Image (cartoon, helix red, strand yellow):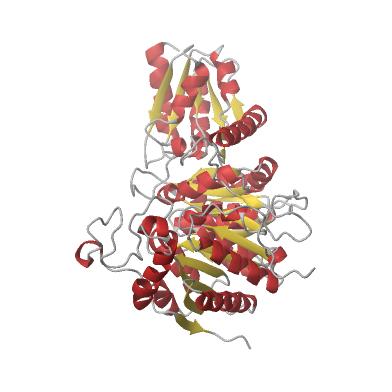
Amino acid sequence: MEKILMKGNEALAEGAIIAGCKAFFGYPITPSSEIAEYMARKFPKIDGVFVQAESELAAINMVYGGAATGHRVMTASSGPGISLKQEGISFIAEAELPCLIVNVSRGGPGLGGIQPAQSDYFQATRGGGHGDYRLIVLAPSGVQEMMDFAIEGFDLADRYRTPVMIMAEGTLGQMMEPIIVREPVIQFYDKPWATNGCQGREPNIVNTLHLSADYLEERNHHLQKKYDAIASREKRAESYLTEDADLVVVAFGLMARIAKKAVMEARKSGIKVGLIRPITLWPFPDAEISKAAQTTKRFLSVEISMGQMIEDIRLAVAGRVPVDFFGRIGITPNPEEVFRAIMQVAEREGI
Amino acid sequence: MKVVAKRPESLKDNKFHYCPGCTHGIIHRLVAECLDELSLRESAIGICPVGCAVLAYDYFNCDMLEAAHGRAPAIATGIKRLLPDRTVFTYQGDGDLASIGMGEIIHASLRGEKITVIFVNNAIYGMTGGQMAPTTLLGQVTTTSPYGRKKEWEGYPAKMAELLAQSEGSAYICRTSVHNPANILKTKKAIMKALKIQQAGLGFTMVEILSTCPTNWGLGPLEALEWLEYNMIPYYPLGELKVKEVE
């Protein structure tokens, strides 16, 4: 099949359109702005809606309203903007409105920088806003997956009536790769809960206020049950040379591709090292990690942060083997650096 | 038997939770009567605020959403842009619209969003128990302006109708009151006009309605109506401030 060269942010935007996304509401922020720009160019020509909101707060609430109509809608931003959206994301999660939220991430805290980072991992995987909720979080590792996960993200969002987040390092948004453009999605979900005018039915209500403590608890149990179902069905990871590995590197996103190269180099040096790449950051693929913990001697978490995913790895490992960490922030480690980190652990531990 | 009065179809058969003497009930009924008379109930989508009207989804018999504090105009934008043939309204109080939601309301107006905003201004935070609102009058005592609102400390009350009338995107801006029957009827006319202008697609519409809060003002219902007339109307003059006529 013919491939075309596309920039990550544009591939993601095109993927959303392929998935039937009808509206984009956003606020510019580097390094995510090309998604908004792409939608601003495309949507007026295909009867879609593009609104540049006055703020991230407004943008996420436009998503709330747009999703409530039953249409597929999305927003995209980066770290500081995603922080501002958290109020709305919490409401969207409880109102069970399907939508796609994209974090083309950069380094924090505060205004941080515009270089790629993975330091929004906690924010993405722990809910991010107030209350007990989760997002499905997908972490693409290339431009093809920027497109594919946009399509899959909308499907998961509708299937579970839940917000889905794509978290991609800024690099993935900015870099170009040849990709296969997917076929348009033609099958959609019924949304009898949508607030789109009550002709011929009882009025629908989209609401997150539950003044009765008993009902509030019931709602939370309902959400938890849904999250349990997602966790039992949707955990995804990719394993590479883990069967005989004495050391398993864990990395996600583009970082996983870089780490894979380092793993291949280390194998050439005779080190039995493998790689696990979580594809869903939530639900975290703990079974994959736990399985490897039965045979490997050590884990090494490689992240573009000060160490966040390492906590999930440790939970999955449950103390059976040690978990080391190598990470930088703002600066994406290159394959040589990761190779050196692997060799250092291997030498120190006699692997 | 002849029916001389009945509940509008656009109101559910639920008892209002509002305090005795509060004028929210009257305003709810007016909005519902307008939806009925324009046959809009089945195409209407309403957005409730945070504040005393937070439970308005239990009262309006049309599709309803509950917003985060101040965000109703953004939600309305999302809905109206995707469903341009529906009638979208927000129902907001003064804390919701003029304080925490100031950004959302101004930009909805500037964009000329074809929505109708019912803005209930009672110069105080009702639900949280009588704190100062952006529309609290100078000298007015609230729990967070216990010495009376001073311009040196708390600044000046927000005149939202005047502010939004300045915006090119606004097609209808009107301030009314519900302190007596004549003004209640004028309020209904204004809501009708706002909805019609929304339907005609002329732009952003808002009716600011001066309303009472006997509980947090510390007044009886009748005294509250008088207080509104003699204190609020001089600062918040009634009338249409912006009208793009439907052709």
User: As rendered, which of B244 and B32 lies closer to the eye?
Assistant: B32
A173, above or below A120, in the image: below
User: As rendered, which of B232 and A160 lies closer to the eye?
Assistant: B232
Residue found 32% across the figure and 68% down from its top? B157
**In the visual, does A178 lie left or right of B102?**
right
Q: Position of residue A116 (x, y in %)?
A: 42, 45
Q: Is residue B26 visible?
A: yes
Residue found 58% across the figure and 14% down from its top? A244
A254, above or below A75, in the image: above
User: As rendered, which of B18 and A317 lies closer to the eye?
Assistant: B18
Q: Using the rendered view, name the quadrant where residue A199 is placed.
A: bottom right
Q: Position of residue B109 (x, y in %)?
A: 48, 72
Q: Position of residue B145 (x, y in %)?
A: 26, 57
Q: Using the rendered view, name the quadrant where residue A72 is placed.
A: bottom right
B50, above or below B203, in the image: above
Looking at the image, how many numbered discs can be counted on the residues?
Answer: 0
Residue found 35% across the figure and 63% down from its top? B134
Q: Residue furthest bottom?
A: B247
Q: Residue furthest front?
A: B1
Q: Is residue A241 visible?
A: no
Q: Position of residue A18 (x, y in %)?
A: 69, 55
